[in-house]
Image (spheres, rainbow, N blue to C red):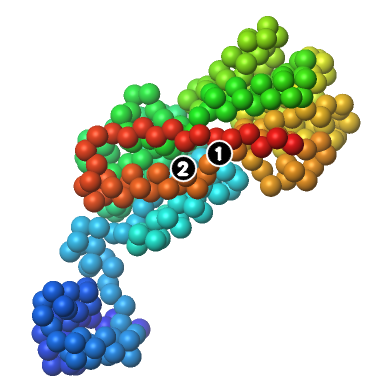
Amino acid sequence: MKKRLSISDIANDLGISVTTVSFILNGKAREKRISESLTKRVQEYVKKVGYKPNQLAKSLRTGKTKSIVLLVEDISNPFFANIADHIEQQAYEHGYHIIYCSVKNDEQRAKELINLFYDRQIDGFIIAPTEGLSDVINVLLKRGVPVVLFDRPLVDVDAHTVITENEKGAFDGTMFLLQEKKAKRIGFVTITSSQSQMKGRLEGYMKAVDSVGMDLLVKKINPSQKDEEVVDQLRDFIQDNKLDAIFFATNYLAINGLRAIKKYKLDIEKLVSFDENAAFELVVPPVSAISQNIPEIAKQVVRILLSQINGKLESVEKVVVPCKLIAR
């Protein structure tokens, strides 16, 4: 294997000091009053030999790896995939790279990943926390590690957070079904979870239905169940309660709802999903959506994390990003 070229090799080849080469490669030539001709000679030589800096050595000098961990439930989920794309773009513009991790609602797996990357001195963490992570995240915070939580906060963790208006979004979506779609019996489909964002969406639905004195019709799905089982449960929920409208707490639940409607030819067309999906405007019946402002969420997450990394934040920020109804 060919030996990796070092700064010392460049200095020896050009007959100048290692310090001079280092200043030039780190953009400090003018600050250190190094001549333009020498700077140009070093830059042209580096380009000619294809020198690449040793990132490990650089991180040891600067204390920064220029890498950020993004920890989510499932990176294949459309919401997380979309927000990961925006976070990566924002981070890259500031010279940082993102390491993606899916934890699949596995508490132990999440803890192992957090500890692994802490040991590797990652610059910061962006986490959509699963249940049971409060202790390990609190340890990171006590150690001064930059952390931002998004999508759902943890009640016993005083960390920087960026979330959506879950309760208001669900309230607005339910009122849309009541007022615009003239729905009489609205079911709410969610998952069995104590996560704060799911609680907020349920509360928004309940407040809207209570405001007009209608029955609360809630179906909770175990997220570990197979799609075929969920489809059959949704058929029973719709038929048993004679629903004429449904609010789905997530877009993947809405997809299974559409499967049930198609498979069993169910007569229900008034549908709203929390979170958008590209298919919702293409299917019959179309699905209205409470759309989260993903670019803004990503922008706030990256801003807060980089401010922590650069020591520019003193107080804990709690950012709530508005969402909007896409009516179909």
> Residue 52, percent across and down?
31, 78
Give the residue drawn at x 21%, y 47%. 311
Q: Examine the rendered structure and indicate whether residue 114 appears above or below residue 121.
A: above
Query: As rendered, which of 274 and 140 lies closer to the eye?
Result: 274
> Residue 251, percent across and down?
65, 37
Give the residue drawn at x 41%, y 37%. 162
Q: In this rendering, would 197 be left or right of 272?
A: left
Which numbered tag is attached to residue 297?
Answer: 2
Q: Amino acid at mark 1?
A: Gln
Question: Between disc 2 and disc 1, whose residue precedes?
Answer: 1
Q: Amino acid at mark 2?
A: Ile
User: Alpha-carbon neighbours of circle 1 within 10 Å: few (<14), some, or many (≥20)?
Assistant: many
Q: Examine the rendered structure and indicate whether residue 202 appears above or below residue 117.
A: above
Which quarter of the rendered picture does the N terminus lie within? bottom left
Q: In this rendering, would 201 be left or right of 26?
A: right
Which numbered tag is attached to residue 111?
Answer: none
The residue tagged 1 is 292
Q: Quadrant of residue 9?
A: bottom left
Q: Quadrant of residue 252?
A: top right
